[in-house]
Image: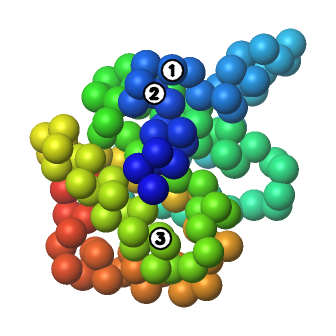
Amino acid sequence: MKELLFKQNPWWEGKKDYHVEKWESMKIRWIPKWIKNISLKPYSLNFIVGPRQTGKTTGVKLLIRKLLKKFRAESIFYFNCTLLADMESLRRVLDEYLEVKKLERIENSFIFLDEVTSLKDWWRIVKGYVDMGILKTMF
């Protein structure tokens, strides 16, 4: 599982993200306006919704690129949840990142769960972690 986390967070190893590289190679580039409206204050929970193939993932990756200028790479966690089978897998992914966070002595972090609604009952894991205070030091 840890290998998959590193593959989805190439900035942890000083590498560039695929979506950002693709965006940078485009002749015409755009930055979604909703990026300015995202609250990054502790403790924020934001949902980005819209039709498929409209740039939500690219927008999130551009936001991550911006955050990387101010925060340690390991404090920014992205995961595409379409690779997961169920909410138990989501729990394992979050636990794995929380372990990375602990090992790296990261106090506050940003978590981006892309396509999380593809998992049935995903909200139960997130709500449970919030209610237990496990995510209290996330931005």
Q: Label 2, on which residue?
A: 11
**Depth order, front residue of 4/108:** 4
Label 3 environment density (alpha carbons within 10 Å; few <14, some 14–19, many ≥20): many
Q: Are marks 3 and 1 in contact (CB under 8 Å)?
A: no
Identified by mark 1, the residue type is Lys
Q: Is residue 127 above or below residue 105?
A: below
Horizontally, residue 110 falls left or right of residue 21, namely: left
Task: Using the numbered discs, state the Cα–Cα distance from disc 2 to disc 3 in whole angstroms.
Answer: 21 Å
Q: Position of residue 3 (x, y in %)?
A: 46, 45
Q: Position of residue 99 (x, y in %)?
A: 24, 54
Sequence-first tag of 3 and 1: 1
Task: Using the numbered discs, state the Cα–Cα distance from disc 2 to disc 1 in whole angstroms.
Answer: 5 Å
Label 2 environment density (alpha carbons within 10 Å; few <14, some 14–19, many ≥20): some
Can you tell which mark lies on residue 15? 1
Residue in the image at 68% along x and 38% along y: 58
Identified by mark 2, the residue type is Trp
Q: Position of residue 18 (x, y in %)?
A: 67, 29
**Depth order, front residue of 40/137:** 137
Horizontally, residue 93 falls left or right of residue 43, namely: right
